[in-house]
Amino acid sequence: MKVAHLILAHAAPAQLSKLIGALEDKHAWFFVHIDRKADLDAFSFLQNRERITVIADRVDVGWGAYSIVEATIRGFKAAVDSGIDFGYVNLLSGTDYPLRAPSEIHDFFARNTGENFMEYYPVYHEWAEAIPRLTQYHFTNYKFPGKYLVQKWVNKLFPARRMPAGLEPVGRSQWMSLTMDAVRYLLQYLDEHPKVVRFFKHTWAPDEIVFQTILYNSPFRPSLVNDNLRYIDWSKGEPSPRVLTGEDLGRMLSSGKLFARKFDLSRFPEVIAALDRQMKDHQS
């Protein structure tokens, strides 16, 4: 089972190098998008590496903006254009890390061929806090003076937005593991539905909704598994998940997940070292 790991990174080149090293396998390829704001020289270790493709047309990624979706789309296209017959495209951030050895990860995907792993909670029934993302206009993706004042008045003067193309919105986590067929479908759908693209360009954090919604409203719905295979701790109730430490090790390893996020190698190197030892023990 060949796997394309699509990694979105913006900083911490040493940690990104560790992540790729932990996932390296004869059946693994890497497609890496580095935020356009980042100094590419700091990531020179990615150049001229077998099985590593750095996305050339980089996006200036903004938090909560459609630019995250654009970066992901460019990564999807790079995987498709490679001509390699991947079984899965696995979307990661540079602050993720595997909980299982590469051979176990590939075996898992081989056993579950055809299933697509992502979180897809119905917005209007199980994820109500996301409703304003869809009913209001958001100018997060744009850069012009006074954009939030304009956004405020647009939402006062214009009626609530409605989902385009009869789509039923679902989503939650941005991170997912998709079959190559699903990835091709997403790219084709977005090419053929410019109104859907325009809608999500005015949605806050569309990366948590757009891909999930398209697949949920497609022939791929029976293949969806409502599990993104990631251990993530949202216990603090903040916009970003808690940074994991050595104290989380037991919970991570017993979670049954394949990956976890997020980690900080500079602050808590011991937890990544412990995961490396665990994976090495499983491989020996």
Image (cartoon, rainbow, N blue to C red):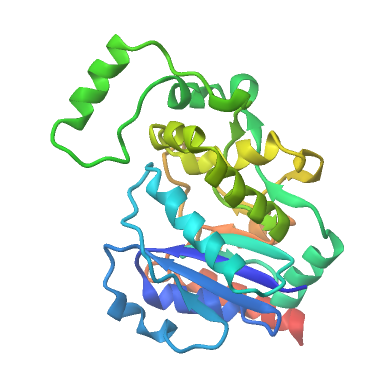
Q: Residue at x 30, y 75 (%)?
A: 40
Q: Is residue 271 visible?
A: yes
x, y percent for residue 176 = 62, 52
Looking at the image, which is closer to me, 113 or 81? 81
The residue depicted at 36 percent of the width and 70 percent of the height is 12
In the figure, is residue 121 to the left or right of 131? right
- State the count of labels: 0
Q: In which quarter of the view is residue 97 placed?
A: bottom right
Q: Quarter of the image for the N terminus: give it.
A: bottom right
Q: State whether residue 92 is above or below residue 132.
A: below
- Quadrant of the image occupied by residue 30: bottom right
Farthest left residue?
Answer: 145
Residue at (29%, 11%) from the top-left corner? 156
Q: Position of residue 180 (x, y in %)?
A: 69, 60
Specify whether 54 is left or right of 171.
left
Q: Residue 35 at x, y = what percent?
A: 35, 62
Quadrant location of the C terminus?
bottom right
Which corner quadrant of the image does residue 125 belong to?
A: top right
Left or right: 235 with respect to 264?
right
In front: 251, or 188? Answer: 188
Q: Is residue 236 visible?
A: no
Q: Residue at x 52, y 41 (%)?
A: 208
Residue 26 to residue 33: above or below = below
